[in-house]
Image (tube, rainbow, N blue to C red):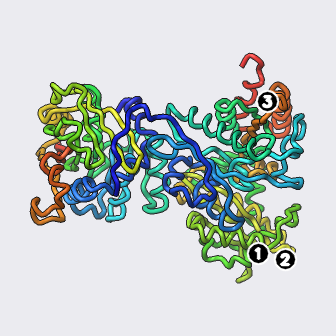
Amino acid sequence: MSKNNAGQFNELATLYEDTAHWPFRKEIEIPSVLQAIGDVEGLSVLDFGCGTGMYSRWLKQRGAGRVVGYDPTKGMLNYARRRAEKESPGISFVTRLSPDLIGQFDLVLAVHVLQYASSGPELQDMCADMVGLLRPDGRLLTLPIHPSYDPRRSYYERYGLRLSADDLQKPYVDGGGVRIRLCKNGKQGSVFAAYWSAASLERALGQAGLRSLKWRELDAPECAALGQAPKELHAYLQKPHSIIIEGVRARDPQ
Amino acid sequence: MKFFPFRSDASHAFCSGVSQKLSDMDEHEWDALVSDDNFYNSYRWLRGLEHSLGATDVLSVHGSAGLVAACTLWEGDQSPGMFFLQDCMAGVRGPWQEGFLWLGGRRNTHNEIPCIQGRRRHQALAELGRCALEYAQQRGYAGFVMPYMPYQAAVEFADAIGGAVVLHSAQASLEVPDTGLAGMMASWRAHDRNQTKSEIAAFRRMGSRVEWGVPDELDDSVAADLITQNRSRYGGMQDREWVQGILAGQRKSGVSYFGAAAVSKRDEDMTALAIFYRFGATLHLRYFGANYSLDLNDYRYFVLCYYEPLNYAAANGLTKLRLSTSALRAKVNRGAKIEPQALVVKCADEQQICHSEAKRHNHRMLREYQDKFPGHLSRDWELVGSQQNPTN
């Protein structure tokens, strides 16, 4: 992630942490991610773009062994450190990926990260960084902007989220700008992101050495059927703004 | 949960305000602004003071996404000592006998403004300074000060608010080697190594041992008694009840969760204790207490405050030991570096402080420390030297 892209998060730590309580994350994204991750007992985990460290804390609390949170934004990491030392001690948070982390992890989690690659080469570098941290057969789970997200800026507003494509006529162009805004209880913040198509994401992850790619739609795991999810979440579930991509680091990267 | 309509992009300005107590603020939001070294401005430390000594006003600056800068307020001490403005400003002319507003936690010996990182940090500090001056003027103070700031943090704050930087103290700290005391001793001259070995040997010869625990397990009245004995010996005015109240406040605020207590014992008698706090990668020494009715020449102060914590820090992944502002010679002799500490002052009447005089004062203090502690000064002193050049 470029310095400019990282810097835009410096003031957003508390607002970002708050989003964990917003229904679209609390009822849909977070349980979907934790379900996809499964048992982490004893696993070494790197939370790539950890932000406030919420997933790092939860994974540590669920029994993960070594947990490292990486985020280049100092404002986010301050929040992560301060909160983790009270609630989940033993997580190390870093602002850069040092060579000794390469190939060390069973699981790399990268939630809402790939959209902050602002160019094709940057996307490729980011994927290479993520996959390079994995041991052979280690798993990557990442959540980019959904390639089929709804580009109408009002669509997600009821969830406290607004995604607006720079070019409403051509919202699905690789590298196209997307402004993401968060708004709750009078607090708001916005960041600039980029759209990446399914083909570009698969290509970048594949070139980085990830195999057995799977796409998982977000759902509401607590509900037996999507129709049983709370009514106010139906619109989100029909067009979630994010999606899980999962894959395994090949033993012999091509 | 309530979702408000999105506002326009123009709403990015800061707004500032005053709260009457810290509990009006969210703990995690506050602590997100607190760096590893700034433990004494962390939420739980300040809440501990509030429980013990009563609430004070809090200045806060908010951006559209939440808190961007904040600090607690107090009035300093009204009698000579470490928190008496005329003593802090000795050697610099100014209206220091008048009332000034003090920024930071009460009786803090390390202060930085809790503030966001990034491109709007300077603006956030400036807004906090503007708000502090307005608060001070409305209440008849001659201005405001923030004491005991690391020099770089002081320069940054003064630059943002148009204040002056006045060196007034210094703080000792140790970089903790991975191998703890052994690693530290390996970097020393033979004389210093031998001295440490003989002090530790004397401690053991007297039948003393060290036990580590958490402050919550200590009997506050016993701990307060030992701490008060030490403070009285060096001119401290607070009595045992005062110290006990402080420890009770810490227990209530939860800051003792970060605590670690090194206790020296002979048989089952507690002969001394040192209380530390872990925060980020740093171990902060805050209290030492001893039973001086036992005439032991067993170096328990050095064992508890320097030697043992180096091993404790290394074993717990901590990389820095902060040793506060007193007894600098003894600390330097045991491997500590000395860091400059400055007070930032902003007078309501700009004419009342002469910036060039403050710089001359800082230069004198730099020379004094260079003469007293050659080879033991941190790199921040180079910055002090570079700031003395009138062209800077």
Q: Is residue B253 above or below residue A4?
A: below
Instruction: Please give the residue where the numbered disc 2 appears in the rendered image.
Output: B294
Going 62% across and 50% down the picture, which residue do you hit?
B18
Q: Please state which amino acid type lies under the numbered disc 2.
A: Leu
Q: Name which of mark 3 and mark 1 comes first in the sequence.
A: 1
Check disc 3: other Cα within 10 Å, few if <14, some if 14-19, many if 20+: few
- State the SS at label 2: loop
Q: Please state which amino acid type lies under the numbered disc 3.
A: Glu
Nearest to viewer (mark 3 / mark 1): 3
Going 23% across and 63% down the picture, which residue do you hit?
A39
Going 63% across and 57% down the picture, which residue do you hit?
B20
Q: Is residue B227 above or below residue A190?
A: below
Residues tagged 1 and 2 counted as in contact (Cβ below 8 A):
yes
Instruction: Please give the residue where the numbered disc 1 appears in the rendered image.
Output: B271
Q: Please state which amino acid type lies under the numbered disc 1.
A: Thr
Horizontal side of B289 relative to A31 (left or right) equals right
Horizontal side of B26 relative to B338 (left or right) equals left
Any part of residue B259 in sight: yes
